[in-house]
Structures are given as structure tokens and as C-alpha cells.
Amino acid sequence: MASMLLILLSSLAFDSILNQQWLDHAHVGMIVLDLERDSVIYANNSQKLLVPASNAKIVTSAAALMFLGQDFRFKTRIGTDGHVRGSKLLGNVFVSGGGDPNFSLENLEQFVNALKNRGITEIEGNIILDDSYFTDERLPVGWAWHYLDARYAAEVSALSLNRNVVNIHIESTGPGQPANVTIEPTTRYVKLVNNMVTKMGDDSIIIFRRPEANIIYVDGGIGFRNKRDIEVSVKNPTLYFGEFLKERLVASNIRISGRCIEGTEASSHGMVATYNVIDSVLSPPMLEIIKELNSESVNLFGEAILKTLGSHYRRDGSFLGGVSILKEFLRRCGVDTSLVAWYDGSGLSRHNLISPYDIALVLRRMYHSDLFDTFYNLLPGPGEGTLIGRFNGLKGFLRAKTGTLHAVSCLSGYLNIDERYYCFSIMFNNFACPRKQIERTQEDLLEAIWAFLKEET
């Protein structure tokens, strides 16, 4: 990018928008590029290292599109060893995970039917769960312990089910009476401790799972005639997959005498053998996965893509293996990766550090690629996904990704004005004012940028 023209317009209204009292002690970085002229329209602390939050998904999704391709699909397989005598399987059931973060309850039911349709009513062996496509580290560095029960912090596995969460359905009864609380899907893998009561007035729900166990505590109160659904992540998604598969087999009148065994334990006991695949499930194409990753900011998708990049290219399905591929992509975008700290694929880690300039380099690289139209449309526009209720005046002109953590609010993407494209990255860190105030500032900045560029064109 050494040849890029530099046109710093520090006298623009942007400076006055940023010159607010509540930003005096915050960390702010911003850059706007004219992609056609390869020039800088505006920059303010553009090379300062900041926490990107979910703006990290811009890097992850761009790398996935470049390195895995829009037609890439995750594959999950089920098979058996041994042989069937009558209606009894004299052997084990094997499930092999290929990293699909979107494997659903309906997909699992397909596996149950695959066994049932072979006339099997009894399984003498075990359910062996091969999740070795990813390493067994479930969480990246830099995720905070206090939100690990939240749906947005679900653990990562090469065998995922129902996005590695259960839904806690809460329904009021009579005032002063215990509330009705159930787990969906119904499973013995998760224990529920319900101390919630029905109350008059607003909800005051307390719900949590301790990091070390699959016991979910529900306390507080739910307002009379109210009902709520709250998703909670599970501990060890691989066993969640296996135990729920076993429960569904039993519910379908298929008895099983063995237990669920994770691949690492099976390997150590010499139990992993060649098996016959009887069915498989392909995920939606990567294009659809990325669309939801960016629009709804699904963190599990980002981590599964990161580990898949490592497994696919390095035979290393660890977070570190995936990060090495992301850094290779960043280098190809012109980023000096010695000045970047990176630990996950979703941006939930507070240890990630990158500059607005580097984010802009990624957006610039995608603009100059054959994949630009595809990538551009994978970012949400006003009124879509995480941009619902925001930037309504820029419909048809804006595609951008938000990034939010405590005291972090970032926005990066593209502006399209009369078929001329610009990219921008606006990053706010370490602010004490309400986040809505920062979001209003972002909107003021984008409107000022749009007005200035519209006038220039």
C-alpha cells in the first residue's frame, strides 16, 4: 500500500464530531479510503492498536471465502463396525465430526433413522465420537469466565449439536407459585435446578451454569402471564452430541448396552477402527454460513471456521493453527502481522489487537478481488442483522459489520455512492459513557462521510 495517495482532510466535520467530552479519555481510531483512487480520505489514529470485537469476523469471513471457497461444506458421518445379526448390531456406532457448527436436531434425527432403517433394534457396543478434526481445546484465550454459559460463548467442537446450547423455556403460573421451567431439547445431559417463582410486575430472572458442570440454575422471578426463552451453552459439546444421540436411539426403540466414548479415549484403548459409513450430513455451503456469521454475529461459526482453516491447511485444528492461516491472509492483504495480536475467529477475545488501517487493508484487498460482489453482500445493510434499527438513512449505500464488547464499539465496512466504493473502519475502545452514545457518534460520522463523499462525486 506504499503507493497509496494520502489525502488527509483534517478540517472536515469528522474532527468536530470526535471532539466530544465523553471521548476525551477513550481510545479512538478511524480511517476512510477511496477504493477507486486508492487514497486516504480521512485518518485519525488509524494505526493505533485496538480491540476489534466482532469486526474480527471481517477477517475470518474474508479468509474463509478466499481459502475455503463459497461452496465449501462441513461433513458429519455416522457408521458402524462389526456386523448385524438379526436386528442386533454386534459392534459400535461411530460418529465422525467435520467441524459443522450448524448441525441440527433434525440432522441428528436423520442419523437415528439411518440406523432404524437398517432394522437395528439393539446395539451391543458403544457410541464412539470422533471429534479429532479439531483439537480438544474448547475455548480460545481471552474469553471471560463470567459469560461462558451464554449462547454467544458456546464451546467449540468438531461435533456440534444445536449450536451447543439448550433453550430454557420459562412460563409463569400463578402469583407466588413456582414457575414452569423446562429444557429444550429434553435431555438428561443437562440438569435443571429451578427456584424461580411467578411474581407481579417485571421479570427479574437469574440464570447461570457453572463453568465446570452442566447444571443450570434458574432463580428470581418471572412476571405474571409472561414467558421467556433463554439459550444457555453446554459443557463439552462432543458428549452432548453423543448422549443426546443415545437418548434419541432409546426413544426410537433401539436399545444400546454401551456408553458414549470420546475419540481421544477410544484411541487410547485401541477402539478406533475402520468402520462402514451408513449416512452423512453436509452443512449449508460456506456462503450461507458466512452470511449468518456476519449478519447475526454467530461466534460459534467464527470459531469453527478458524479451526477448520487450521485443520484444512496445517492439519492442526487448534486455535493457534487457525490463527496462523488468518495471519497469512492478513500478510497477503499488506498487514504487518508483527503488530497484530490474534487469538480467535469471532472477536470475543479481548486479547485481539488490530488497527483500523489493517481492517481497511482487508476490505481493500477484497474490493480488488474477484470475490468482491459476493463479499460485499455478505455484510449486513441497514435494517439487517446487527444493523436493525440503525443507519436507516443509508439504505442501499452501506454494508458494515458491528463489533461490541464492554467498552468496545467498532464499525467497519463499505459505502457505495453512485457505484463508487469506499471502505472505512471506526473503532472505539475504553469509553465509560453508554454504548448507545458511541453508536450515535458512529452514525453521525457515517452520515457526515456520506454527505461529504456525495458532494465530491
Image (spheres, rainbow, N blue to C red):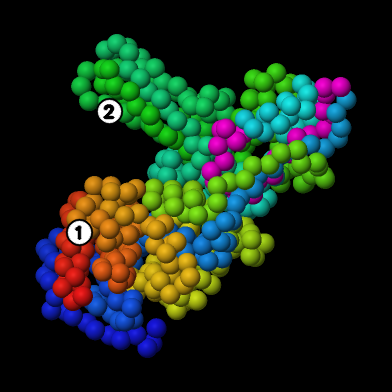
Residue 225 is one of the magenta-drawn residues: no
Query: Few, some or many C-alpha atoms within 10 Å of disc 2 (few <14, some 14-19, many ≥20)?
Result: some
Where is the N terminus found, in terms of image quarters? bottom left
- Which residue is identified by label 1? 443
In which image quadrant can residue 350 be found? Answer: bottom left
The residue lying at 44 percent from left, 35 percent from top is 232
Which numbered tag is attached to residue 204? 2
**Measured from the top left, where is residue 230 in percent x and y?**
39, 32
- The residue tagged with tag 1: helix, strand or loop? helix
User: In the image, is residue 229 above or below residue 456?
Assistant: above
Front residue of 435/453: it is 453
- The residue tagged with tag 2: helix, strand or loop? strand
Asked whether residue 351 is in view, the answer is no
Front residue of 277/142: it is 277
Front residue of 61/145: it is 61
The residue lying at 56 percent from left, 33 percent from top is 105
**Measured from the top left, where is residue 269 in percent x and y?**
80, 43
User: In the image, is residue 1 above or below residue 407?
Assistant: below
- Left or right of residue 404: residue 201: left
The residue lying at 22 percent from left, 82 percent from top is 8
Amino acid at circle 1: Glu
| Cα distance in 3D space between marks 2 and 1 | 33 Å
The magenta segment is 86-108
